[in-house]
């Protein structure tokens, strides 16, 4: 018995980081997984080999591309016959000073972090509604709750994603579909490493972030994946239209 036996899950942006950790964990718990990647490459192929090709498939689609997302859902149904869980994980950091932001940066941020999620929800919802069951888990951010100056407009998109989660969760609650989000704090993934590497002293920058956390350590991708697993399963069947913050307590800290 596994927690996701007989379930089919699509995880977007699953080539690395939180998405890859979620795909691995879901597969270990018995799910068939669709590994969405922006562009197909060695990372996705290695992940399929690790999970086992009978239980996983890769589909390359930019979540901002509506037609590509629709094709991914069609391919999922053709291969596995159903879709029970959607984890909208694909996301990009667009951090700028508001008055230095270009239109292109604004549009790309919203196209991936908000509209891309909507494309995936729109494509899976008819299948979940027809089945009378489904769980959608959106990876938002602590930036959807708190503001860091100079990180604009990422928090605007993540606030919107939490709003989308609530709206869809309420809309479809009576038809068996739950929609929730997870708001991670700092998690040690390639995108976080890229940020540290951009700092004059990457080791000191990482230590400074760890020191800011009440638990004095940065989160791990698998810790987000376990929260997504819980929300995906029937164990969380009364949890809907809400957000789970997982940030080691940092967002509750006033000051030390
Ligand atoms: P990551 O290491 O950058 O991984 C994100 C993945 O999403 C990458 O594999 C990327 O593909 C893919 N992706 C980006 N744009 C895409 C698109 N348009 N279509 C399909 N896939 C796309 O990031 P992460 O840290 O694991 O973050 C995952 C999610 O958690 C994001 O939504 C992020 O906002 C959120 N989050 C992260 C943290 C953190 O501290 N790490 C904290 C809060 C929230 P490529 O590799 O090909 O670019």
Image: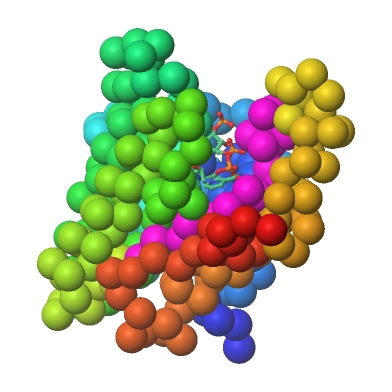
Q: In the rendered image of this protein, does residue 189 appear above or below residue 181?
A: above
Could you tell me residue 12's position as x and y percent?
Answer: 46, 46
Is residue 182 highlighted in magenta? yes
Q: Residue at x 45, y 73 (%)?
A: 231
Q: Is residue 211 left or right of residue 54?
A: right
- Numbered marks: total: 0
- Give the residue drawn at x 77%, y 56%: 217
Is 135 contained in the magenta span?
Answer: no
* Horizontal side of residue 94 vs 196, given as left or right: left
Which colour scheme appears in the figure? rainbow
Front-most of residues 255 and 78: 255
User: The N terminus lies in which quarter of the figure?
Assistant: bottom right
Location of residue 229 in the rendering, given as x and y in whole percent from the top left corner: 53, 71
| Residue shown at 28% from the left, 59% from the top | 165
Please report the bounds of the magenta region as a residue range: 180-195
User: Between 55 and 34, which is closer to the camera in this rendering?
Assistant: 34
Q: Position of residue 178 (x, y in %)?
A: 29, 72
Q: Is residue 75 visible?
A: no
Q: Quadrant of the C terminus?
A: bottom right
């Amino acid at each position: 018995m596994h927690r996701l036996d007989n379930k089919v899950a699509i995880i977007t942006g699953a080539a690395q980081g939180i998405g890859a950790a979620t795909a691995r964990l879901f597969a270990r718990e018995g799910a068939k997984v669709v590994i969405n990647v922006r562009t197909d490459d060695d990372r996705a192929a290695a992940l399929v080999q690790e999970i086992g090709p009978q239980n996983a498939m890769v589909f390359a689609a930019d979540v901002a591309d509506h037609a590509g997302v629709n094709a991914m859902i069609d391919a999922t149904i053709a291969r596995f016959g159903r879709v029970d869980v959607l984890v909208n994980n694909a996301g990009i950091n667009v951090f700028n000073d508001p008055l230095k932001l270009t239109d292109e940066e604004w549009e790309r941020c919203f196209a991936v972090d908000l509209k891309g999620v909507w494309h995936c929800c729109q494509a899976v919802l008819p299948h979940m509604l027809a089945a009378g069951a489904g769980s959608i888990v959106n990876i938002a951010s602590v930036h959807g709750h708190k503001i860091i100056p100079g990180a604009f407009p990422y928090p605007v998109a993540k606030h919107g994603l939490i709003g989308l989660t609530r709206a869809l969760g309420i809309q479809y609650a009576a038809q068996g579909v739950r929609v929730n989000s997870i708001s991670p704090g700092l998690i040690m993934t390639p995108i976080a490493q890229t940020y540290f590497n951009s700092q004059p002293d990457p080791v000191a920058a990482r230590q400074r972030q760890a020191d800011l956390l009440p638990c004095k350590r940065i989160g791990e991708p698998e810790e987000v994946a376990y929260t997504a697993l819980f929300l995906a399963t029937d164990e969380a069947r009364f949890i809907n239209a809400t957000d789970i913050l997982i940030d080691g307590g940092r967002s509750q800290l006033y000051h030390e």
